Structures are given as structure tokens and as C-alpha cells.
């Protein structure tokens, strides 16, 4: 069936898929200007999860410096020493604005990184770490058609802004939401979650486009398509990309050339829906995975078959404080969990508890 042969309802469906992530990135949710208040009086500990995956919210941790004013909180990652890195979209940009923050492994000692405010422009979004031959680097996906590679201190190594190259092509609009480097690879895979739903491959040396692109708007798997490939992770055991195909309510495992491997459905009515029907990202750690859902839950899942082991009801429990929409989440080495909520921007630290009796 060609575009000219489509009946009106099919055309409307296609248009809807395109508009879902190219207009406001989260059109189904109202944007809040409320400043989150993690200091609301807690009459008792906030605990969520079940079995051996129970967690307690620790409000005294992940405190941001007073100079940081978060509009939208977006990405978190960690290094091999356990340090936690966070990036966000600021309320406004001044000469002193820094949008990369590092915490000690225990969630204390926040430090602003970067020589200047270069990373603050556009919309800072996805954040991932890569260990390469000459050391570790951070990859920053920015909705302004941009990918940055930086040192762990926030110093820019290279910047690729694709506006001049791709504007007016099928790759436009280009609004990157995540970027990941597979272990040992010389390529970085960039998810265009809020643009045209492609995944593009760049060279890690200079950020140049390699010529490989796959995906695009749709819900098919042969060939692979996406509707907001919001997160792009790496499964180091199976050596596959794990794409959070949020608009299609599913996770997609694909080869590095874009070939479909398997689908993990997350939609309402499926066995995994309790972990969130709008997966924003996937981070794998040992035998488990953590999947933040924009609709409120954060799922702890078995890595092998992606069955739900536990659910942290983050949006439900911390919603009154402003932590409504989980946008990214990672495990620490001790399996504590860091959750980053989109709007209003909020970071929360969840300490793993002993298994319940």
C-alpha cells in the first residue's frame, strides 16, 4: 500500500504517529511550573516494591546546589567508581549555568561540571557513559539536533549539530533523546525520539555521520520502525541495542544494523503494564533491568525474559512532591536506584531494603 493508496483513516494514523513526538514531547501530560518540594513533611518512611526488591525513598540525598534551577530533569548515568551524573534543562541560562552535575556514590557532594555554559543551550536530554581506548566519556543527546561528547569533567570533545546537513531531508526534524556506544565499538547510536523516530550511527572519534540509519515512524518490525525511540541502551550479554519505543508502548531489541530481534510489549493489558506502559529507558545491571515509565511506575525486571520482579510506584508516592513522570533511572552498584522525573524536574534516591519476610 503506497501513500497515495492510503484511505483517510490510515493517513490520519500516520499523521498521528508523526505528531505524537514532534509536537510537545509529552502532549498527554500537562506541563507544570511548580517547583518540587522534597522537604514536605514525611510522617513515615516512603517504601515501595516487593520481595527482595523493596526500596525506601531517601529525601536527604541527591540535593542539588542552590544555584541549580531545573525546568525539566532528563538524564542520569554513573561511572565505574559509582559517581552519579545528572543532566537537566535549566529554567534560564546565564553565564554561570551548568547543566551537568556529579554526585558521590552515596548521593552527596553535588558538583557542577563544565568550563562554561555550552551544554546548557538547546534542550539537554539523554546522558550515557562510554569507556573507550583513551578513557571514559559522556554522550549528551540534545533535542536541538545536537550530540555532544565530553570528558567526565564536562569538557566538550566534539559537537555534532545536524541542522545544516539534514534540514529539508527525510531525517528532519531531528531531536535526539539518547545516544549509546556499544562496548568496544567505534560508533554511537543516536535515538531521534522527538523528531523523525530514526536511529542514526555516528563515529565516536569526531561525531561524523557514518551513513547508517534505520527505523523511522511506524509500528512494524520488518523492517524495524519506531514511534519515539526515546531511549537506546546496550545489552552487553546478547550484544544488541535495546530501544525504548515509547510511543508504541514496547521495548525493541535490534542488531547494530537495525535488524529486528524481539519485541517486549508494555501496553495496557499486557503482563508488564504494571511496570509502566510508556518506557522511557532501559538500564541493565547484572541479572536485572530498571525501566522508568513516563506514566508513573519504575519497573524492576528480570533481564533474561523481562518479567516484572517489582514495581516502585514513584509517581503515585512522590507525586505530591513533584516527582510525577519517571524519565530515566539507573541501578547503583549496590542495586540502590536513582530516578529522574521529567516535569517538574526531580531526582530521587531509593535505597534497597532487606527482603521482606
Image: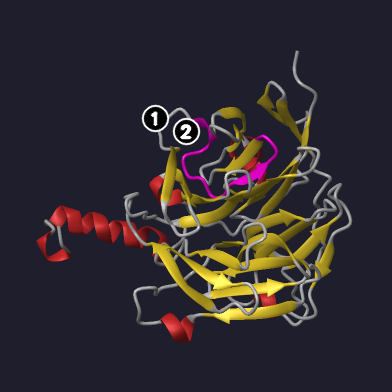
Please, which colouring scheme is shown? secondary structure
> Residue placed at 77% from the left, 44% from the top?
332
> Residue placed at 58% from the left, 79% from the top?
160
Secondary structure state at the residue bearing disc 1: loop
Q: Is residue 188 visible?
A: yes
Q: Is residue 36 visible?
A: no
**Which residue bears the numbered disc 1?**
269
Disc 1/disc 2 C-alpha distance (Å): 7 Å
Please tell me how crowded label 2 is: few (under 14), some (14-19), or many (20+) other residues with Cα within 10 Å: many
> Exactly how many numbered labels are in the figure?
2
Relative image position of residue 116 (x, y in whole percent): 77, 81
Mark number displayed over residue 320: none
Would you identify the image quadrant in which residue 302 lies?
top right
Q: Is residue 116 left or right of residue 223?
A: right
**Which residue bears the numbered disc 2?**
273
Which image quadrant: the C terminus?
Answer: top right
Relative image position of residue 185 (x, y in whole percent): 63, 63
Relative image position of residue 119 (x, y in whole percent): 68, 75
Please tell me how crowded label 1 is: few (under 14), some (14-19), or many (20+) other residues with Cα within 10 Å: few
Would you identify the image quadrant in which residue 22 lies?
bottom left
Q: Are marks 1 and 2 in contact (CB under 8 Å)?
A: yes
Give the camera-side residue of 199 and 92. 199
Which image quadrant: the N terminus?
Answer: bottom left
Give yes or no for residue 325 being in the magenta stretch.
no
Q: Which residues are magenta?
A: 274-287
Farthest residue toward the bottom?
164
Q: Is residue 221 left or right of residue 148?
A: left
> Residue placed at 67% from the left, 34% from the top?
287
Amino acid at each position: 500500500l503506497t501513500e497515495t493508496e492510503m484511505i483517510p483513516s490510515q493517513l490520519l494514523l500516520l499523521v498521528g504517529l508523526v505528531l505524537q513526538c514532534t509536537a510537545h514531547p509529552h502532549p498527554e501530560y500537562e506541563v507544570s511550573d511548580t517547583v518540587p518540594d522534597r522537604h514536605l513533611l514525611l510522617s513515615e518512611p516512603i517504601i515501595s516494591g516487593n520481595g527482595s526488591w523493596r526500596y525506601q525513598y531517601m529525601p536527604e540525598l541527591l540535593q542539588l546546589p542552590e544555584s541549580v534551577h531545573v525546568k525539566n530533569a532528563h538524564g542520569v548515568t554513573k561511572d565505574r567508581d559509582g559517581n552519579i551524573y545528572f543532566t537537566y534543562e535549566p529554567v534560564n541560562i546565564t553565564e554561570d549555568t551548568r547543566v551537568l552535575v556529579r554526585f558521590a556514590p552515596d548521593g552527596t557532594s553535588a558538583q557542577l561540571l563544565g568550563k562554561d555554559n555550552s551544554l546548557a543551550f538547546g534542550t539537554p536530554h539523554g546522558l550515557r557513559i562510554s569507556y573507550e581506548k583513551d578513557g571514559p566519556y559522556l554522550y549528551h543527546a540534545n533535542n536541538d539536533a545536537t550530540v555532544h561528547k565530553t570528558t567526565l569533567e564536562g569538557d566538550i570533545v566534539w559537537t555534532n549539530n545536524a541542522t545544516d546537513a539534514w534540514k529539508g531531508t527525510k531525517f528532519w526534524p531531528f531531536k535526539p533523546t539518547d545516544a549509546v556506544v556499544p562496548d568496544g565499538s567505534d560508533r554511537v547510536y543516536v535515538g531521534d525520539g522527538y523528531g523523525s523516530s530514526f536511529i542514526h550511527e555516528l563515529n565516536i572519534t569526531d561525531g561524523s555521520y557514518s551513513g547508517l540509519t534505520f527505523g523511522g515512524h511506524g509500528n512494524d518490525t520488518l523492517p524495524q520502525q519506531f514511534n519515539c525511540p526515546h531511549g537506546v541502551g546496550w545489552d552487553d550479554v546478547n550484544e544488541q541495542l535495546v530501544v525504548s519505543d515509547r510511543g508504541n508502548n514496547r521495548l525493541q531489541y535490534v542488531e547494530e544494523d537495525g535488524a529486528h530481534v524481539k519485541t517486549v510489549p508494555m501496553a495496557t493489558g499486557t503482563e508488564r503494564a504494571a511496570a509502566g506502559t510508556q518506557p522511557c529507558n532501559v538500564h541493565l545491571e547484572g541479572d536485572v533491568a530498571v525501566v522508568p515509565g513516563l506514566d508513573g511506575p519504575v519497573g524492576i525486571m528480570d533481564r533474561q525474559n523481562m518479567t516484572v520482579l517489582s514495581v516502585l510506584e514513584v509517581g503515585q508516592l512522590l507525586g505530591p512532591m513533584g516527582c510525577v513522570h519517571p524519565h530515566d533511572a539507573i541501578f547503583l552498584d549496590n542495586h540502590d536506584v536513582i530516578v529522574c522525573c521529567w516535569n517538574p524536574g526531580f531526582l530521587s534516591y531509593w535505597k534497597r531494603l532487606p527482603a521482606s519476610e
